[in-house]
Amino acid sequence: MSIISHHKFSGTGVALVTPMLASGNVDYDGIDSLLAHVQDHVQYLVVMGTTGENATLTAEEQRNVLSYILQRKPLEMPLVYGIGGNNTEVVVSQARQVLFGVDAILSVCPYYNRPTQEGLIQHFSAIANASPVPVILYNVPARTGSNLSAESTLALAANYNIIGIKEASGNLEHCMEIAAHLPEHFSLISGDDLLTVPMTTFGASGVISVLANVIPAYFSAMVQQALIGDYATAKTMLLDLLPLNSMMYAEGNPAGAKVALSCLGICQGYTRLPLVHGSRSLTEAISQELIRLNKRWPSLIGR
């Protein structure tokens, strides 16, 4: 077990999409383009999270994508790898085998089983005790059907190999309860792009973002303004993102992000079933919104 400062994961982390070809195969050239697009602007990478479509990639594909990115990312840029599931024994086994170069793992609440809070605590404790790298919890009740309570989060934070939580419950009071009692080694990380700025006002260290795939310079600049207390600028930038953010999820995540990346010429917009390629109407709407944002913020959009 290695203790790594939670400060390594402050600012903007990007939940990388996994570019794909029309054939359904992973598009490694697209990964290269995506890394070139984001790496100068974000503080760390998150690979094989929900936005990376990890649910529909085989275990071998997941390892291959991770290995490819580890070989090509900037050496000094931290990387978080998604390892989660609803079979504790399997997740523990995967955590033990994490590749060299991974700085932390992101582990989502078990889905479908709907465990009790005690079950969630035991699940994450088993992962943290087995993992050779620190663990960031991921609470996203809309996807998993279970909510890790603030009390359970803080109980888990007593384990020094659990260094933070990506909070995507959408419940600001819940997040405030965590923030009010944060241990020094533990970070509260926004899991919702639009809640990042308000969450920084009560102690969030940043975000693991979907939009940072698309507009990394803009999004990271907004987060940095919030973190230094320039909330007037951060608010203006945040409110200008409302139309684009809603488009990201209109036809499922990461379909919207991949459409936006295709509009920018970064990679193609293909997903794997049961997700489908964004519709023509969504593509046109996203394209027009990117043009609007580029006119407003030309130095930060780059289109």
Image: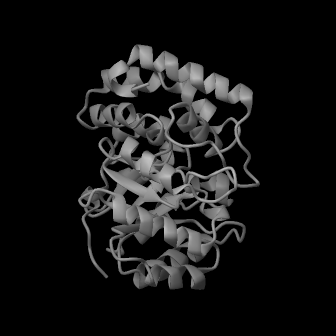
Count of residue discs:
0
Left or right of residue 170: residue 199: left
Query: Relative to 279, is 181 above or below?
Result: below
Q: Residue at x 37, y 65 (%)?
A: 70
Q: Nearer the viewer, residue 290 or 31?
A: 31
Q: Residue at x 36, y 69 (%)?
A: 102
Query: Relative to 171, is 93 above or below?
Result: below
**Residue 83 visible from this viewpoint:** no
Toward which corner of the image does residue 274 lie, by quadrant? Answer: bottom right
As drawn, the residue found furthest toward the right would be 274
In which quadrant will I find the C terminus? top left
Q: Nearer the viewer, residue 101 or 115?
A: 101
Toward which corner of the image does residue 2 lie, by quadrant? Answer: bottom left
Residue 282, x across and y down, in percent: 69, 29
Q: How is the image coloured?
A: one colour
Residue 48, x across and y down, in percent: 52, 61
Q: Residue at x 55, y 44 (%)?
A: 170
Residue 244, x across and y down, in percent: 55, 28
Q: Nearer the viewer, residue 227 or 15?
A: 15
Q: Nearer the viewer, residue 235 or 285?
A: 285
Query: Relative to 286, is 166 above or below?
Result: below
Left or right of residue 72: residue 271: right
**Residue 290 visible from this viewpoint:** yes
In which quadrant will I find the N terminus? bottom left
Residue 143, x across and y down, in percent: 66, 55
Left or right of residue 25: residue 228: left
Left or right of residue 199: residue 9: left
